[in-house]
Image: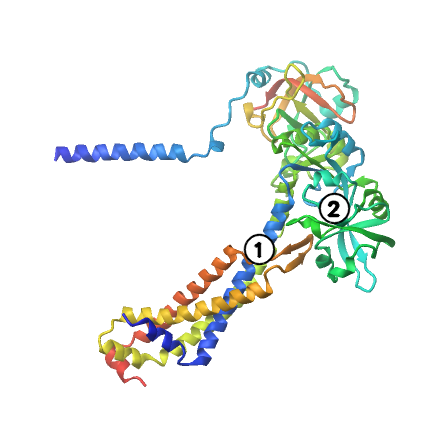
Amino acid sequence: MKLKHTCLATAAVVLLAHCQKNDQAAAPPGDSAPAAPSAALMTVIDAAPSGEPKAIHVIRETAKPGDVITVSGRVMGNVSPFVEGRSAFILGDPEVLTPCNENPDDECETPWDVCCDSAKDKKRGTATIQVVDADGRVLKEGIEGVGGIEKLATLTIAGTVAEGSTPELLVINATAIDVAP
Amino acid sequence: MLPFSYATRNLFRSKARLLQTIGGSALVVLLVMSAVAINQGMNQVLSASGSPHNVILVGTGSEESVQRSEVPERAAGIATASIPGISEALGIRAVSGEIHYMNYLDLPGHERTQALVRGVSPEALRVHSEVRMLEGRFPRAGEVMIGRLAWRKLGVPENSLRIGRKVRLSGQELTISGRFAAPGTVLESEVWATLGDIRVLSQRDTLSCVVLRLDDPADFAEADLFAKQRLDLELTALRESDYYGRLSNFFGPLRTMIWITAGLIGAGALFGGVNTLYAAFASRVREMGTLQAIGFSRTALVLSLVQESTLACLTGTLAASVIALLFLDGRTVPFSIGAFTVEIGPGVALTGIATGLFLGLLGALPPAIRCLKPPLPVALRMS
């Protein structure tokens, strides 16, 4: 009787081990856990922005390339506000733009695209936020989900206004990003 | 078991019933084969039309329709200079600014029909590498070139679109300068003219889109980054394959309608066929009773009846396959954004055979069970 139980237990362990091995083998490579954020990206996420944050529509009128600024806003302004595989996204100005689901009786499934606002307001109330390396190139890793940066998340960002920025086109190289709880 | 020859001989006992069964099953199989072939053809043409190497820059908010999109003219030049990874040959980068213009085309002697006219520059040939000139040349001002299947989309005879013929678009006469092919894509149902002509005829000062070809599809991120860095241009970067994938989803309800129509007609034919078998088997209750009395089991009798029905349905499948090959294979079917070719390939043929087998096996079972249900003494006394 004891031998029978031992045999059954051994068979169960072998079967279980076999199943686990098969599960590991069956998992496609693409389904593996996403790579951990790089140190360069984590430095920006972990840093605390200093200075009084201003709204995007205020900053864009006065900011010049090289200016150090602090800005606040929400991740919105496009149906896909994050750049695929790059540390860049669109920040929207809540004083100018409203996520559609915050309008009464609106059950928009993609409120971050702010489709209820005019193209003029979108132009005025959005800025590109990017995290760059020492050579000024945007990091080749996605930023969505890192440190709580999600669609419609409220962020405070410190950084410098990128080269080529104009009142019509505001691009900020972030040096510190804080996600509001 | 009853001999196979018993089933084959029984088939010809009533020629009218046999023809009815064969005709009904042929109709069902033909409908299923047509629905599968049309769905496959539409899916194939839409999936082949989008290259994973190509990126379309459209106006933000017009991701669903290039024709509605407005992109500033300068976007093409800025994209050429800014996006890394664009294919390059002889120092020229593969970037094509295009206007997609839908309007009526007048052909002398024919009714005016709606056509998709693409305003392009010669750079379009670098981006749409599947396009091949069949005859003639790329259009100059006042000229158009015609896709190989455009006649089908326009609903005119093929020879009415020969080189040198005139067409009229928005009141302007244009001469056909060439004919092109782009196998398996919607492009070959289009009419191409110069960007300058279409800019004037469509009275617009913006492009519909900028199409660029990347050496490595993974560089799509660079195009996406460009679109999101240049918010002033109000652009959205789309993989061409994703754009046509969305169009394929857009036509999903149309494909569902095809299936529903085929299903409804097929169900009518199927019930007609089952009814015929009920009548055929009901008149043989005493015969079945006699066979049971001399020692054949009910299972053997059911198998023989199923053999009969399957033979008739497979004959119908054969007839449907011949009709499909003769009248459907190679036909082009127009739809709103182009035309596709119906192909009766191995997949479609196998679906037809599977449908025939299904009809034969499952269509015979209820009548056969009903025929063998009466107890033996009752069955032997039935007239």
Which residue shows up at 29% across the image and 72% down it?
B2
Q: Is residue A142 visible?
A: yes
Q: Residue B40: percent from the left, percent from the top?
A: 57, 53
Residue pictured at 79% horizontal, 53% vertical? B103
Identify the residue at image location x=67%, y=55%. Answer: B339
Q: Which mark is residue B67?
A: 2
In the rendered image, the vertical position of residue A121 relative to residue B3, given as above or below: above
Which sits in the foreground, B139 or A167? B139
B316 on left or right of B339: left
Q: Relative to residue B125, is residue B146 depicted above or below?
A: below
- Pointer 2 indicates a residue of which chain? B
Disc 1/disc 2 C-alpha distance (Å): 25 Å
Residue sitting farthest toward the front:
B135
Q: Of B192 and A69, which appears nearest the observer?
A: B192
User: Which percent across, then down, holds residue B254?
Assistant: 61, 56
**Amino acid tagged 1:** Asn
